Amino acid sequence: MGKRRSSRELALKFLYQFELNEGNLDEQIKLFLERNSSQEDVENFMKELVVSLIDKIEEIDEIIQKFSDHWVLDRMTVIDRNILRMGTCELLFSFSTPPKVVINEAIDIAKKYGNEDSPEFINGILDKVYNEIGQKGPLPFTS
């Protein structure tokens, strides 16, 4: 498994935990990585993705909701919701990963962690996000 895939899977596990536990983001990341140690570059990309996502979560959730026909974010599984958040974040906010790779990675992670409908669901929404917004180039990342 590649380092970026490992980072994304680690990010998904963290985001699952983060949704269920309130607290300081930096402290939770620190504790999580102490229990789930990995190579430094894997951890660095995971942290970059998670921090970017959490910083832009309201905007990301709005975008996902816009393209989620007949689905409300709260009704999605935690896994699907967070895979969509990661993919949307990477597609739209100044990450250097090619869009096709972002979408394929999200689908593969959905196959591993989601249910049998997750890959198609994730693909459909991320494809819409990219085609409607992402093709215009990454959005500027502002805090």
Image (cartoon, rainbow, N blue to C red):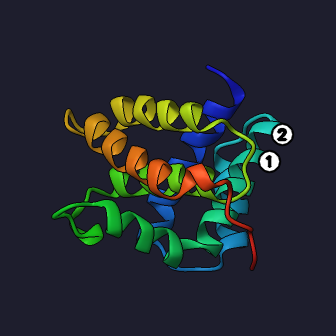
Residue at 52% over, 58% down: 133
Q: Which residue is mark 2?
A: 40
- Name the side, left or right, on which 6 lies relative to 88: right
- Name the side, left or right, on which 23 lies relative to 76: right
State the mark number for residue 104. Answer: none
The answer to whether the residues at label 2 and label 1 have Cβ atoms under 8 Å apart is yes
| Dot 1 amino acid type | Asn
Residue at 55% over, 32% down: 100
Q: Which residue is mark 1?
A: 44
Q: Looking at the picture, tell me which residue is in the foreground, 24 or 63.
A: 63
Q: Residue furthest left?
A: 70
| Dot 2 amino acid type | Glu
Question: Circle 1 sits in a helix, a strand or a loop, which is it?
Answer: helix
**Where residue 47 sits in the image (x, y, percent)?**
72, 55
**Where residue 94 sits in the image (x, y, percent)?**
73, 55
**Where residue 10 sits in the image (x, y, percent)?**
59, 43
Q: Residue furthest top?
A: 1
Q: Residue furthest right?
A: 40
Residue 50 lies in quadrant: bottom right
**Looking at the picture, does residue 17 appear above or below residue 117?**
below
**Looking at the picture, does residue 120 appear above or below residue 134?**
above
Q: Quadrant of the C terminus?
A: bottom right
Residue at 71% over, 41% down: 37
Residue 65 lies in quadrant: bottom left
Question: Circle 2 sits in a helix, a strand or a loop, which is it?
Answer: helix
- Name the side, left or right, on which 120 lies relative to 43: left
Residue at 51% over, 66% down: 18
- Name the side, left or right, on which 142 lies relative to 114: right
**Looking at the picture, does residue 136 appear above or below residue 114?**
below
**Where residue 79 sits in the image (x, y, percent)?**
36, 51
Q: Looking at the picture, tell me which residue is in the foreground, 74 or 95.
A: 95
